[in-house]
Each structure stands twice: as C-alpha cells, then as structure tokens.
Amino acid sequence: MKGKHIVLGISGGIAAYKAAYLLRLFMKAGAEVQVVMTPNGREFITPATLAALSGRPVVSEFFAANTGEWHSHVDLGLWADVMVVAPATACTIGKMVTGVADNMLVTTYLSAKEKVMVAPAMDLDMWAHPSTQRNVAILRADGVEIIEPGSGELASHLVGKGRMAEPEEIFRAVKKYFDRSRDLEGKSVLVTAGPTYENIDPVRFVGNWSSGKMGLALAEALAARGAEVKLVAGPMAKSEAIPGVERIDVVSAREMLDACLNVWNGCDAGIMAAAVADYAPVNAAQSKIKREGVDEITLTLRRNPDIAATLGCIKGDRMLVGFALETENGVENASGKLERKNLDMIVLNSLSDPEAGFCKDTNKITIITREEAPRCYPAKSKREVADDIVDAMTALWEGK
Ligand code: PMT
C-alpha cells in the first residue's frame, strides 16, 4: 500500500469515530490519505483529529470560507487510487446512487476514476429496508465494492445487522484490492463470452439469451490485473475498447471453436463464459424460408462441437475454467462437467436464482474444484464476481 493514494470519505454516522482507526491503519501501511467529510460527518468526529492523523487538511466544503479557495473534487477523483467511504450512511448511499452531488463526498465519488469501496453503517431496520437494499444493489451493479456491515449491538442499542465492518476488515479489503493489481502481467488468457447464433436461414437463427456481460466483466477483471486477454465474443453489444483486451467477434459455435483454437496455443489459461448453442440446424437454408402456405416446418439439429472439452483435451498444464448454467442439481451437474471437459475449475450459476443468469448485472456463483469443497458466494455485480473468479483461478494456479 506504500505510496498509494486513498480518499477516505466519512459521512454522518456514529461509526465515524472508527474512521480514525482505519485512517491510522492506512497511514501505517504507507498510504497517503485525503479525508473528505460530509457536513454531518463533522458532527461525529472532528476534522482536526483526522487532519492531524493524515497530515492533510480535511476537505469538506466546496470553497474555503475565509479565502474562497475552491476544492476540486475532479482533482481528488483523479488523484485517488481508491476511494473508501466508511462509514456510508443510508443517505450518502442514496445520494451516490442518484448522483445528488450536493457535498464534496458525492462529487468526489462522481469524479473518481478508480475503485470505490463502501462500508455501510446504519440501524438494522434502515439496512434491511427495501430502499437501502435496492440502492446497495445499484451501487454493486455500478461496480462499487460493498464491504458488508456486521451484526451486533447498534447505536440504538438494538441488536442486528448494520454496524460498520471493523477497520481491520475494511483495511484488509483495500489491501486485497491493491495486492491483486497487476499480478497477471505476462499472462495471456482466453475468455469466451456471449451466445452463439446458428443460422436457420439468412434471417433466422437458433440462439440463447446470453448478453455477454459475464464474459466482458471477466475480460475487464483480467486486463485490470495486467493480463493480455483474447476475448472471443459471440453476437453481443459492442463494448468500448478495453486496454489489454483483443476482441475477436464470431457468430456460430464452429466459428467460436476455430477462433479459440487459433489463440489457445499462445494462452496460459482460458475461461469459458460463453453460452454456446448446443445444437445447430443441419442444413441452413441459403435463402429465406417462406411462410406462405407452410403451416409447419421441421428443423433437424446436429450437436455442435464442445469448445471447452476440445480445449480441455489439449490443455496440458494450462488452467481451464468452465461455467455451468443449471436449473437443478447444480453441484452434481457442474461437477460432472468439470470431469467430462477436463476443467480445473467450474463456476456454477443457476437460472432459478433471481440474482443470477442471462442479462442480469449481478450473478451468484458457486466455485467447484477438485481440491476443495464447493464454495458459495453471495450475489454481487458481475464485475465483482469476475474478481472472485480470477482470485480463485490465480490461487489454484499458485498451488499447482
Ligand atoms: O452473458 P450473460 O448474459 O452475462 O450471462 C452469463 C451466463 C449465464 C451465460 C454465464 O454466466 C454462463 O453460465 N455461461 C455458460 C453457459 C453454458 O452454456 O453453460 P453449460 O452448462 O451449457 O456449458 C458448460 C460449459 O461448457 C461452459 O463453460 C460453456 O461455455 C461450455 N460449452 C458448452 C457447450 C459447447 N458446445 N461448448 C462449450 O464450450
């Protein structure tokens, strides 16, 4: 953490006093910390304490009252390697979600270019309220990492979930974020994403609902850690170019297989997040099939090649990660795929889970390997899920 720039946002809750301990932990680890407080935050802990601990004046107002000097939230947003909001009240979370930029903390959040982490703190009923839960889900989907509150006695003396995670836990989450940055430099990783379309005729196809969001999130997570990514993408929305990611667009399963085989030799690992059509029409019509006078048509489908299994056969000591999209008997079915396709790890997601599956911004996964018992993760944004998958893959890699 030495030399890293951390913006510590403090909003108005009793847990604000713990922010001083968190600040000490960051300082001891060699980070530079700029505290940004909401006006209510100042009621719970004095700026003088935080300025003394950080060695920097605390920023709280848009202008310095006596000199008129402007505090630039844009500069702060650019300066930060990470922004940590601890404590984050229900009010501040709501403002972050809706962009109500009426204080320095929220304007800095809106200007932040790098990772933002939020440690909520509030009473148990406020935390459990659908409004808060909705807002937290939106922040997650926006790529913000939520450091879950703990359970225990709260300021109201009620007992339940809502107290801010302990400073040590928040510190560990930030350290983990910095530790993972650039750990995949020099590695090349193949990622498949999106659906495949299998032509029936020039205007119709057999396909599925995959949006490519999960695969794209994986490509982003890998590239953020320094990997060179070959993203073999089925038909899915165009994304902004991501530095470090070479996108190869394909349409059908056979094209996806060819593209994967073309790059697989130069890769150290592969993550198969695409929803490949299992079957394709045997003979796609060359011209549009007419409907006039035709009440029924019969399509004969033939099994497509299994891309993951093909790469699994020739993978040698490379790492191969598959996905399993199941509706029932998830662990059993996914474990079968792990073996049949010669994978090192499989990521189970279930269509019966409301927070998982096609097109969603979130996913809820279980990671299955041969080495350990299946590990379930809570619902998170697909970008956070991608980090968890890459973490698990690199841990397995290191163990080999
Ligand atoms: O794209 P999103 O909208 O974000 O949705 C993400 C997702 C639900 C598509 C993704 O998380 C996911 O589960 N992808 C795998 C879907 C799938 O096809 O699962 P499966 O259980 O049928 O296949 C098992 C594995 O074999 C997968 O890694 C798949 O990519 C691979 N496979 C399957 C068939 C085939 N012919 N070739 C393959 O390589």
Image (cartoon, grey):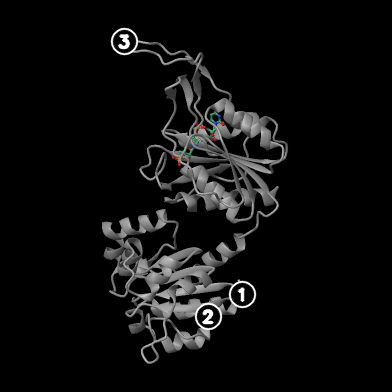
- Determine the image quadrant of residue 10: bottom left
**Direction top: furthest residue:** 293
Residue neighbourhood size for the residue with mark 1, other residues' Cα within 10 Å, grouped as few (<14), some (14–19), many (≥20): few
The kind of residue tagged 2 is Arg
Mark 3 or 1: the one toward you: 3
Quick check: 163 left or right of 221?
left
* Mark 3 → mark 1, Cα distance in angstroms: 71 Å
The kind of residue tagged 1 is Gly
Q: Earlier in the sequence, mark 2 or mark 1?
A: 1
* Helix, strand or loop under label 1: loop
* Mark 2 → mark 1, Cα distance in angstroms: 15 Å
The kind of residue tagged 3 is Glu
Residue neighbourhood size for the residue with mark 3, other residues' Cα within 10 Å, grouped as few (<14), some (14–19), many (≥20): few
Task: From the viewer's side, name the closer residue of 208 and 252.
Answer: 252
Where in the figure is residue 160, as x and y percent of width and height?
32, 65
Q: Which mark is residue 292?
A: 3
**Direction bottom: furthest residue:** 66
Where in the figure is residue 108, as x and y percent of width and height?
42, 71
Mark 2 or 3: the one toward you: 3
Q: Which residue is mark 2?
A: 24
* Helix, strand or loop under label 2: helix
Task: From the viewer's side, name the closer residue of 375 and 354.
Answer: 354
* Mark 2 → mark 3, Cα distance in angstroms: 76 Å
Q: Which residue is mark 1?
A: 3
> Mark 1 vs ligand 1: CB under 8 Å?
no
